[in-house]
Image (cartoon, helix red, strand yellow):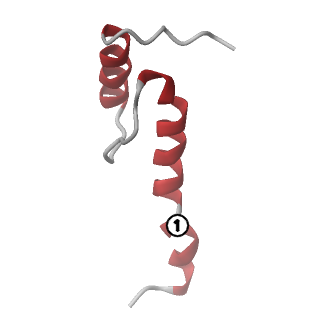
Amino acid sequence: AKGVGEVGAIGSPPAVINAVVDALRDYGVTHVDMPATAQKIWSIINAGINAGAPPMAAE
């Protein structure tokens, strides 16, 4: 059984992963497995650049 205080924490990880996928969509990313480590995200960005995606512009 879940504790009453856990309800607010259930949706956070999927929301963060969806934000990461949205931020990386220009690299052709449609899915990122959890945990989204810095090394994993760096590898995804480099793979996208090597596949022909333009580097991200600083905003």
Q: Position of residue 10 (x, y in %)?
A: 49, 68
Q: Position of residue 29 (x, y in %)?
A: 40, 32
Indicate left or right for 14 with 8 as reference.
left
Q: Quadrant of the N terminus?
A: bottom left
In the foreground, 2 or 19: 19
Q: Is residue 57 above or below residue 28?
A: above
In the foreground, 35 or 50: 50
Q: Residue furthest right?
A: 59
Q: In this figure, what is the number of numbered marks? A: 1
Q: Residue furthest bottom?
A: 1
Q: Residue at image x 60%, y 9%?
A: 57
Q: Position of residue 23 (x, y in %)?
A: 54, 31
Crowding around mark 1 (Cα neighbors within 10 Å: few <14, some 14 to 19, many 20+) is few
Q: Which residue is mark 1?
A: 9
Q: Residue at image x 41%, y 27%?
A: 28
Indicate left or right for 17 with 42 as reference.
right
Q: Residue at image x 35%, y 41%?
A: 32
In the foreground, 6 or 57: 57
Dot 1 falls on a residue whose secondary structure is: helix
Q: Is residue 59 above or below residue 14?
A: above
Q: Quadrant of the C terminus?
A: top right
Q: Residue at image x 30%, y 21%?
A: 43
Q: Position of residue 45 (x, y in %)?
A: 38, 19
Q: Three-letter amino acid code at disc 1?
A: Ala
